[in-house]
Image (cartoon, rainbow, N blue to C red):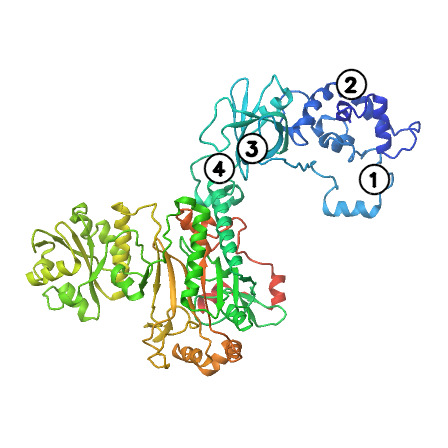
Amino acid sequence: CARALARGRCETMEALHKMLARTHGCGRVGRQRPAAMLETTAKMEWRAKGFAQSAAADVEMGPLGKRARTGGIRASPMAWPIPMLRGCLSHGSLNSLRSRNGGWASTRGKHCGKREASTKEAVGVDGEIAEAQEWTAKTTCCGQIVDKPPGSRVTLCGWVHRSRNMGGLIFIDLRDSSGIVQVVTSPENFSDAYKVSETLRSEWVVSVKGCVQNRADPNPNMPTGQFEVLAESIRVLNPVKRRLPFEISSEDSPREELRLRHRYLDLRRQQMTDNLRLRHEVTKAFRDVLEEENFLEVETPILTRSTPEGARDFLVPARIMQHTMYALPQSPQLFKQLLMASGVEKYYQFARCFRDEDLRADRQPEFTQLDIEMSFVDMEAIINVAEKLVRRVFERVRGPKANISEDGFPRLSYDMAMERYGTDKPDMRYDLFQFDISKIVRNSECRIFLSALEEGGIVKALVVPQGDRISNSQLKNKGDISNKAVDMGSKGVVYLRVKEGVEVDGPNPVKKGLTKEQVREIIAYTNAEEGDLLIISAGDPITVHKTLDHIRQYLAKKLDLVDPDKQCFSWIVDFPMFEYNKDEERYEALHHPFTAPKMDQQGGGDLFTSRAHAYDLVYNGSEIGGGSLRNHNSEIQKQIFTAIGMSDDDICSEFGYLMEALESGAPPHGGIAFGLDRFVMLLAEEESIRDVIAFPKTTQGACVLTNSPSRVVPKQLDYLKISLLSSEDTNKD
């Protein structure tokens, strides 16, 4: 009520009495007022004058700003002598005025229903809104202030990034999603705004009205550094009411545990804002190209059925069909093939995928992939579309610095990639090649090599130019390079240093176990020169490749061989169709069982030794996409299912609907999928995929923000007819 006086709504106490009378539904002004009301107005008269002076400043501070004021008379509910004014003065309005002692229980009228009162008592609330709220529209974004000429009047809304009191002037960095702009307040020009600015703290949400002007001292490090806004009024829309776990404005990154626990705060940080914007630009660039190529975006089901092969499924119990489960899709593979059989010749979607597998820095249980499928195409057509997508992304996010060749990306066969780099996703920004020297050392007297070859293994050498940069202690047991080998399951590595002529230096068992002719052959085969270092690993092929690949990546960083401005793409093609699983004693599809094998023109050839119509796109040592031509012949598809150990009954039960579609006139088709999260992580130069996902899971698959996964109430399990085993029962099983 006193604020109403300050705002000019009630110029006299008599007018205030009339307002109170209307609020209580007392009818005519002359009607007898309740005793409690008379007592209230009498006590207000002696306080209203002083309160009105401070309330004038509260007008500009907004409904919540009054709580942060220092000095003057505050609008605390407890400042008034009777409970009747609790809602009135704490909210700055008369809408919640009531007299609990005088029997006036509701401001909506003079009657109050017993049912409403009993309900409020039952739930333990009195129905009052805790605090007033305000919705303010901005006319300009902070980062777009450069588009406004000096003298323009603007309304900005955002967060207080930081505030600096310079003793006469207060500078506020105001932040919204578009950027940061400096706001200045002066006690001489707009004193009310200056008073409010004195109370502001980091991350308070405020609205600023003011005038754009040139900065006296431009800041070249800020996009808006040439301009500032002279604040004419500042309203506090929402202050921070608790201590924040970390500073948003700090350039130091908080601990990841804190960041994930308070993700809504972490996403305010510039790093995360930039990453989310980058992700948006990447998806937009993808969409633009696909729309130009007349692709159709189609959504496929999230609740589907579990299928064999691949990773473990996330299962969802079906309430309406007891004892059955849905599975969350690991990919839309089958549905996109069905869309091709349906006549959708060009399909895409940004698909959510789910895999219950062990996590790491670049893997999440739920992830997003750009899924693409096309009919009546060959591998070249699909690769051309994929390269066009990649170029458009780099043009969008890197501009002139994209530095991508207009020629087609280089291609390596799977065998060549494994031979030269020891991996099917090589980083080709630097050399450090591997060479298989098994044939050369087969007749040597070095027991390390002979024992590995006798067990069906291989011996490979990694050539490091200018090897004197690496000491012997690093290569020996407990050295950092030796430890990298042990991490990959190897027992360690041996080495040879190339000297003048055909002389080498190294551990005696290796140096003495090789003849001069064998040394000469090794140097010639590996193209090693004087001063080069050969790091040698012996064992089963998988372990040797993993070991030398791991060492190669480690040395590239340690020796500073990676050019950060170089973008290197490559296609890996001609993958084996199958790989043998020794543990399960059966063949498995290297990609997936829907990939078409490369057969003779007449259809002949050995299925188990055939190559696949598959292709992976590698960017700077990381696989960002992969695809294949699919089987549209049902007989070949059935052969592949049989090769991986499925019976006719299994094929009919698991994939009967796919076989029927292939037998119903399915066109030749193929496709590719891009891992969106990983691609954005690489573009953002982040170490973890979690830094480019808004709300990621931890390496344990948990969301620490929402505390999920979590237990559910027994009633929900009863609906599903599910009972949980005790820990004792689980241990028995």
Residues at marks 2 and 3, CA–CA distance in whole angstroms: 47 Å
For residue 439, side relative to residue 107 (left or right): left
For residue 89, side relative to residue 443 (left or right): right
Q: Residues within 10 Å of mark 4 (few under 14, many from 20)?
A: some
User: In the displayed structure, would residue 458 be above or below residue 633?
Assistant: above
Does residue 562 show up?
A: yes
Q: If you read the primary sequence from the N terminus, does the residue marked by circle 3 or circle 4 appear first?
A: 3
Residue marked by disc 2: 46
Q: Nearer the viewer, residue 253 or 209?
A: 209
Residue marked by disc 3: 145
Q: Amino acid at mark 1?
A: Arg
For residue 492, side relative to residue 638 (left or right): left
User: In the displayed structure, would residue 616 be above or below residue 253?
Assistant: below
Q: Amino acid at mark 3?
A: Ile
Residue marked by disc 4: 246
Residue 235 appears at what percent x and percent y? Answer: 64, 30
